Amino acid sequence: MQINPKTVKKQFEKNISKYNRNALVQKELAQKLAAALIQYRTQFDRVLEAGCGTGFLTEELSRKISFNKYFANDIVSKSKNYLNKILSDYMFITGNIDKIKTGSKVDLIISNAMFQWLNDLEKSFDNFYNMLEKDGILAFTTFAPDNFKEIRELCGLSLDYKSMEELRQVLEKKYEILYTEQYTKILTFNSPLEILAHMKNTGVNSLASNWTFKDVKEFCGKYLQKYPDLTLTYTPIIVIAHKY
Ligand SMILES: C[S@@+](CC[C@H](N)C(=O)[O-])C[C@H]1O[C@@H](n2cnc3c(N)ncnc32)[C@H](O)[C@@H]1O
């Protein structure tokens, strides 16, 4: 599925006020990513956080690592309002992470639950490589191919999630991989409509944005038939790599 950054921007912008109450998996992932990172390093000079959203990861990092300069990026400019409550001295850079410039190299590029929205991850990894100092760290979380497998199986809609093996193959060309983790988290809901709302409130509403009432009704019927327990599967991946 080809991703249009303008659509991604619109869907996150529209639902940003509901994100914190709904993005429980992303919040847990931010905690896990920060905890994994500090096993390797806690002091940085310049940090770039890609797709910072409402600042789940920013908050974790502000308590766990030290840095001189923090660049926080998101394609949604409203995200700055949330970051202002977490950091006092930092620079917000609005825009697509594939296009932005920090002006100087950084020694940590970090991102939580965002890389699955990038169209050409290999190209983005190359950009990050050029933005990183030697010995810099690239730390991120994303999701493996079985993420939202229920939605894919029912509607054939899915982002182009990369497997750990695919990520490893691309990264190993330029980075030393320090840490990887993958796990499965299954959420349960009270109705298929609640599942649709959950996805919408966490920014993933392009799937059903143009659905008619009939489409929604059909989706709900099929969901109840195939997944009567009303599960939704998340398959998070955590990676920490080192530019040598
Ligand atoms: C699932 S949210 C994760 C937010 C945050 N990192 C967290 O831990 O909760 C994905 C975020 O990435 C942003 N985003 C998506 N595509 C982007 C891109 N190409 N460049 C910069 N930000 C992007 C979205 O606006 C959204 O805030």
Image (spheres, grey):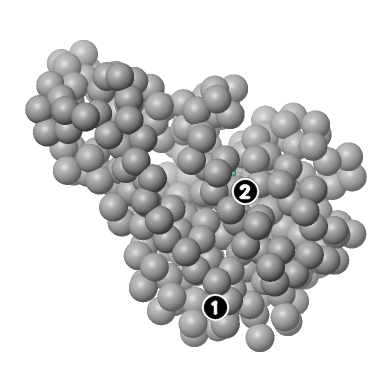
Residue picked out by circle 2: 31
**Residue at the spot 89% in from the left edge and 45% down from the top edge:** 89
- Identified by mark 1, the residue type is Ile
In the image, 121: left or right of 54?
A: left
Say what secondary structure mark 2 lies in.
Answer: helix
- Identified by mark 2, the residue type is Gln
| Residue at the extreme top of the image, as rendered | 213
Labels 2, 1: front one: 2
Q: Report how far apart the C-alphas of labels 2 and 1 lie in the structure.
A: 20 Å
Q: In the rendering, at what x and y percent does residue 25 appear?
A: 48, 40
Graded by Cα atoms within 10 Å as few (under 14), some (14 to 19) or many (20 or more), the crowding at tag 1 reads some
Q: For this rendering, which residue is in front, 99 or 192?
A: 192
Residue picked out by circle 1: 177
**Residue at the spot 55% in from the left edge and 71% down from the top edge:** 179
Residue 116 visible in this rendered orientation of the protein: yes
In the image, 221: left or right of 189?
A: left
Q: In the rendering, at what x and y percent does residue 74 appear?
A: 64, 44
Residue 118 visible in this rendered orientation of the protein: no
